[in-house]
Amino acid sequence: MNSTATLSTDTVWRTLGTILDPEFGLSIVDLGLVYDVKLDGANIAVAMTLTSRSCPAGDMMFDGVRAALAALPGAGEVRVDLVWDPAWTPDMLTAEAREFLGWTK
């Protein structure tokens, strides 16, 4: 992607898919922590949650999201909103994450 490329939600989602939760070693997308991505021109808004309110890696993940998205060519303001509704559950894991963790439904 070059600096004249148009920012897309697909690019944002792919970028978020590279950010790992340090406790699980899985991407925040595979963990189901990212609820929504919105673009308003070059501005990016992400709604995400954590596996628990006491997650010790929360600030590190939010900083990682902000930094990764701000580095995208054409990115403007990046806003990351912490949401608790709906509450995260293991049902939000992707099939790949379930397999990685050895979890079955």
Image (tube, helix red, strand yellow):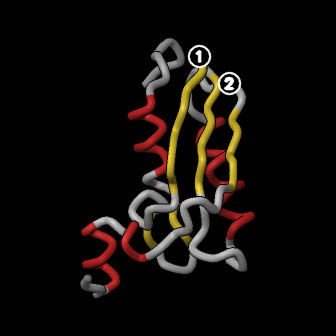
Task: Residue at 60%, 21% (x, y): give it.
Answer: 40
Above or below for 34 versus 37: below
Say which element carries label 1.
loop
Task: Residue at 31%, 65% (x, y): give it.
Answer: 94
1 or 2: tag closer to the N-terminus? 1
- Residue pointed to by mark 1: 41
- Residue pointed to by mark 2: 76
Quarter of the image with the C terminus is bottom left
User: Residue 92 at x, y = what percent?
Assistant: 40, 66
Above or below for 33 versus 42: below
The count of marks equals 2
Question: For the residue marked with disc 2, what is the amino acid?
Answer: Gly
Above or below for 33 versus 14: below
Task: Residue at 59%, 59% (x, y): give it.
Answer: 85
Please identify the residue farthest to the front as the structure is shown. 85
Task: Residue at 44%, 57% (x, y): give it.
Answer: 29
User: Residue 41 at x, y = what percent?
Assistant: 59, 16
User: Residue 11 at x, y = what percent?
Assistant: 43, 34
Quarter of the image with the N terminus is top left
- For the residue carrying disc 1, how many other residues have a C-alpha within 10 Å: few (<14), some (14-19), or many (20+)? few
Quarter of the view holding residue 104: bottom left
- Left or right, residue 4 beside residue 101: right
Question: For the residue marked with disc 1, what is the amino acid?
Answer: Gly
- For the residue carrying disc 2, how many other residues have a C-alpha within 10 Å: few (<14), some (14-19), or many (20+)? some
Say which element carries label 2.
loop
Contact (CB < 8 A) between labels 1 and 2?
yes
Using the image, tell me which numbered label, if any, was put on residue 62: none
Above or below for 58 versus 65: below
Disc 1 vs disc 2: which is toward the camera?
Answer: 1
- Left or right, residue 94 beside residue 72: left
